Image (cartoon, rainbow, N blue to C red):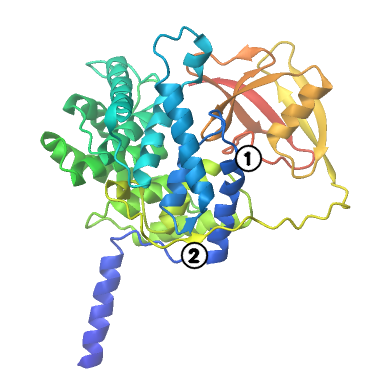
């Protein structure tokens, strides 16, 4: 009877765990390696390169960067507050263009909260007011009948609500209602279905609002919306294990780790997703800084919702810089990549020679150096975003899609993707 009781207890425990997204313990060497990818970015302190997500990811992880963290937060405060709260009388258009976006401001507020700071005082109140104005502008752009679309995206909309929530700042029911409607109908009139990472961010925002007892009149709708987000994420799991794709998986895991709901099978899907992610990272197929910063909290069984009440005294392991092992005498192998741009006239096709291991961005730079090709980018938290090719700027609802011949869209950006020898890469202007 004793053995039977133990067996029944274990089976019951396993049944309960099936409802929980429990991330298995990961080898500390791999976690350290992930953190090391972030360290070089902490030395880039211009407003263009500062990324609050790096700071948030480290603070919610099991790693710390010592004084580098403190200096990075200081740089964030100096640059963001100076940019956002600079002289209102300035007529310099370059200052306006340099201001962080709605999503960057929201991430900055998350960074402050991850250091156990509540935004406050005159400067803090102005930042909160600015983010609320952003949301009001987006709400008006969507419209009373939800026929419009945000100037930015529903991802940034959800992130902004989340950032205000963790600072205990309330937003109006009408603002929350726009995001609820988008999730409930799971369709954007200009974009099709909302992406996995957008749904996950919305779910994190709703979870925060519920835990903080904000917007009580919307509570039932938020509960149903979180359930719908979970179901959407689980249905989007690929045969490899990713939720949507490799880049959306960390944020999806953050939502699943945070929002346990009875009756939803989470254990096995989360295990598959974590296994797929770690395999990609071990092969160094993915080195995107934003993705890594979103994954590190998951490996510590945390999410952005934990910023409601962050544990700033939790012990963390000091992060050591990676040791360079590459031999300087080794001559790099040269590969040849065919670059095609059929969306311009005359169409561009050229074979570009670069060292093996070069990124697609390196290929574009080399093509530009050779002449006959030009491109432009915009710095984003996910890396450089391609804005123009051969003088052709992206218009509203357009983007330059990266295609590996014959017709495979790349999931990675120009800074992350590393072409293989004799591969053909096409830059295709697409309307969405």
- Which residue extends farthest left? 217
Answer yes or no: is residue 234 visible.
no
Badge 2: residue crowd in 10 Å (few <14, some 14–19, many ≥20): few
Q: Residue at x 50, y 36 (%)?
A: 75
Query: Measured from the top left, where is residue 149 in percent x and y?
Result: 35, 19
Kindly identify the residue that appears in the image at 19 percent across and 44 percent down: 212
272 sits to left or right of 427: left
Which of the two residues, 55 or 424, is positioned nearer the viewer here? 55
Of the 4 image quadrants, the one containing the N terminus is bottom left
Q: Quadrant of residue 244?
A: top left
Q: Is residue 198 left or right of residue 29?
A: left
Q: Quadrant of residue 216?
A: top left
Residue position marked by numbered label 2 in the rendering: 26
Residue 211, given in percent of the width and then of the height, sits at 20, 47
SS at badge 1:
loop
Q: Which residue is mark 1?
A: 416
> How many numbered discs?
2
Give the image location of residue 301, x and y in percent: 38, 58
Q: CA distance from mark 2 to mark 1?
A: 24 Å
Q: Residue at x 65, y 39 (%)?
A: 417
Mark 2–mark 1 CB contact (< 8 Å) = no
Where is residue 373 drawn, in percent x and y? Answer: 76, 19
Q: Is residue 387 left or right of residue 301?
A: right
Is 251 or 91 nearer to us in this picture?
91
Q: Is residue 430 left or right of residue 178?
A: right
Binning the other alpha carbons within 10 Å of mark 1 as few (below 14), some (14 to 19) or many (20 upward) gives: many
């Amino acid at each position: 009877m004793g053995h039977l009781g133990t067996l029944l207890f274990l089976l019951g425990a396993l049944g309960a765990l099936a409802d929980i997204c429990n991330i298995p313990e990961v080898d500390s060497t791999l976690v350290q390696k992930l953190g090391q990818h972030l360290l070089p970015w902490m030395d880039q302190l211009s407003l263009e390169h500062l990324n609050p997500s790096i700071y948030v990811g480290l603070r919610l992880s099991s790693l710390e960067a010592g004084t580098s963290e403190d200096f990075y937060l200081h740089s964030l405060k100096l640059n963001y507050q100076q940019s956002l709260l600079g002289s209102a009388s300035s007529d310099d258009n370059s200052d306006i263009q340099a201001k962080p976006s709605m999503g960057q401001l929201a991430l900055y507020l998350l960074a402050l909260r991850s250091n156990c700071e509540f935004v406050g005082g005159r400067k803090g109140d102005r930042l909160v007011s600015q983010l609320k104005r952003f949301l009001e502008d987006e709400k008006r752009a969507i419209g009373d009948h939800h026929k419009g679309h945000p100037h930015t995206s529903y991802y940034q909309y959800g992130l902004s609500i989340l950032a205000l929530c963790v600072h205990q700042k309330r937003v109006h029911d009408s603002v929350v209602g726009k995001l609820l409607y988008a999730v409930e109908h799971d369709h954007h009139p200009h974009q099709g279905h909302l992406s996995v990472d957008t749904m996950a961010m919305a779910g994190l925002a709703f979870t925060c609002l519920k835990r903080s007892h904000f917007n009580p009149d919307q509570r039932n709708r938020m509960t149903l919306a979180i359930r719908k987000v979970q179901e959407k994420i689980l249905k989007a799991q690929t045969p490899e294990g990713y939720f949507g794709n490799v880049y959306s998986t960390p944020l999806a895991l953050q939502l699943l780790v945070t929002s346990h709901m009875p009756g939803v099978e989470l254990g096995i899907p989360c295990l598959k997703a974590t296994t797929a992610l770690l395999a990609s990272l071990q092969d160094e197929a993915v080195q995107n800084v934003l993705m890594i910063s979103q994954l590190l909290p998951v490996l510590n069984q945390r999410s952005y919702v934990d910023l409601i009440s962050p544990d700033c005294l939790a012990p963390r392991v000091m992060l050591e810089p990676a040791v360079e092992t590459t031999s300087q005498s080794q001559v790099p192998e040269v590969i040849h990549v065919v670059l095609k741009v059929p969306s311009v006239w005359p169409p561009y096709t050229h074979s570009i020679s670069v060292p093996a291991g070069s990124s697609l961005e390196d290929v574009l730079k080399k093509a530009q150096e050779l002449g006959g090709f030009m491109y432009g980018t915009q710095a984003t938290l996910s890396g450089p975003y391609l804005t123009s090719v051969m003088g052709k700027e992206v218009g509203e609802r357009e983007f330059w899609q990266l295609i590996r011949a014959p017709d495979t869209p790349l999931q990675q950006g120009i800074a992350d993707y590393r072409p293989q020898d004799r591969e053909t890469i096409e830059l295709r202007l697409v309307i969405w």
